[in-house]
Image: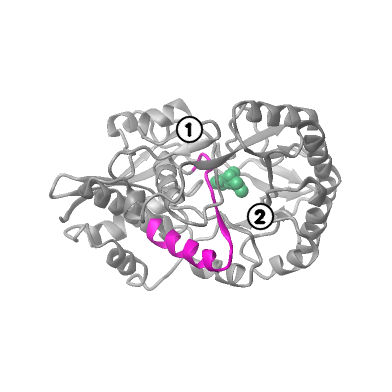
Amino acid sequence: MNITDVRVIVTSPGRNFVTIKIVTDEGITGVGDATLNGSELAVVAYLTEHLRPLLLGRDAGRIEETWQYLYRGAYWRRGPVTMPAIAAVDTALWDIKGKAAGMPVYQLLGGASRERIMVYGHAQGTAVEETVADVGRFLARGYRAVRAQVAVPGLSGTYGVGSDGDRYEPASIGLPEETVWSTPEYLAHAPELFAEVRRVHGYGFHLLHDVHHRLSPIEAASLGKALEPYRMFWIEDPTPSEDQSAFRLIRQHTTTPVATGEIINSIFDCQWLITERLIDYIRTSVVHAGGITHLRRILALAELYGVRSGSHGATDLSPVCLAAAVHVNTAVPNFGIQEYMPHTPETDAVFPHSYRFDNGHLMPGGDPGLGVDIDEDAAAEHPYEPAYLPVARLRDGSVHDW
Ligand code: GCO
Ligand code: MG
């Protein structure tokens, strides 16, 4: 079965998504997510100008060989632009293989290790009481795990707190929004939230928090210690993720579990974090970590060291990525948890899918392949809109990690 076409589709049903559709001479097609939030067109150019010519005429069944060809063959390796492009090709080829075999992709990965995928939802609020009430709403809907974020008084645009009800969408149309950050003010305020969440809702569910790369190692260690009484499932990205040795210092001071990985693109960027047991959850994704083929390799390494997966699932990861994640999560032995932010009805209409949410869990559905597609006519109704992620500055005006 040979590849006859590679279509790169950009659509913006409320936010931008880049999707590829690989077409074969047997009429079977496959889809892959290539969305890089805020830099979408860089991936589009890489796919269209550089990968498409290499793919036309190739055997669609040779998934591993194609991955090696695109990764090793390019000489320039890793990075946030090329890896989602390779990931999208890889994901689409798994979709095609599943359809050709008449099986859901998780069957090709070894079959189901579990019946359902535990997800965590996003509780948020502009004040502690609001977030506490929001946590209650998630628990009432059957969620077993909830991430809690609260605005820091006096700081504009605290990460993780949006204005659109359940949905938090950091990217905005036009030039980047500028937000203000103050670590001392955050550290003085945040522990109060978790004390209050546990006081009101108890300990019978998993509680998570995203620090979003903002702290120094010693600040992160002190936060981890302060949160120990609240038995967190994890603190996420306490320090900038690329500084692997920072996690050693955090580890030396606290037993609060640590997760990182959403900006990591390859096994080489988290090898040391895993083999030195500096984290508890590797939070990579199909789109950013090189597709199903490469993510599986990362998770196999993690399994050896007792590190579990924590699949990144913000709304900028399209339903195609979420579908692929659900198959990986179903199959791998060391699945931990899946982030779940429901997409908008407009997005779901562009990406019909068979995975479904039920009572705090996701289920893959039984369709052959990934069980997700892109409706190209519906996609064409939502043209691309340039958007950026915010930039964070300290009170003195200097740039900080967003
Ligand atoms: C998360 C993430 C996201 C990212 C977003 C950037 O844990 O869900 O931190 O909210 O900020 O994916 O594009
Ligand atoms: Mg995060």
Left or right of 383 in this view: 254:
right
* Position in image of residue 212 (x %, y %): 67, 50
Report crowding for label 1: few under 14, some 14 to 19, many 20 or more residues within 10 A (C-alpha): some
Left or right of 266 in this view: 238:
right
Q: Label 2 CB, ligand 2: below 8 Å? A: yes
Q: Residue at x 45, y 59 (%)?
A: 295
Name the secondary structure under disc 1: strand
Viewer-proximal residue among 221 and 265: 221
**Is residue 241 a member of the stretch shown in magenta?**
no
Task: Name the quarter where the N terminus is drawn.
Answer: bottom left
Which circle, 2 or 1, is nearer the viewer?
A: 1
Disc 2 marks which amino acid? Answer: Asp
Disc 1 marks which amino acid? Answer: Phe
Q: Label 1 CB, ligand 1: below 8 Å? A: no
Q: Which residue is mark 2?
A: 237
**Residue 374, placed above or below residue 59:** above
* Position in image of residue 372 (x %, y %): 34, 39
Report crowding for label 2: few under 14, some 14 to 19, many 20 or more residues within 10 A (C-alpha): many
In the rendered structure, find residue 357 and report the number of the disc placed on it.
Answer: 1
Q: Are marks 2 and 1 in contact (CB under 8 Å)?
A: no
Left or right of 60 in this view: 244:
right
Which sits earlier in the primary sequence, circle 2 or circle 1?
2
Viewer-proximal residue among 57 and 222: 222
Q: Residue at x 62, y 44 (%)?
A: 390
Which colour scheme appears in the figure? one colour
Q: Which range of residues does the magenta coloring cover?
A: 292-316
Instruction: Tell me how far mark 2 sits from mark 1, CA to CA.
Output: 26 Å
**Residue 283, placed above or below residue 136:** below
**Residue 346, placed above or below residue 224:** above
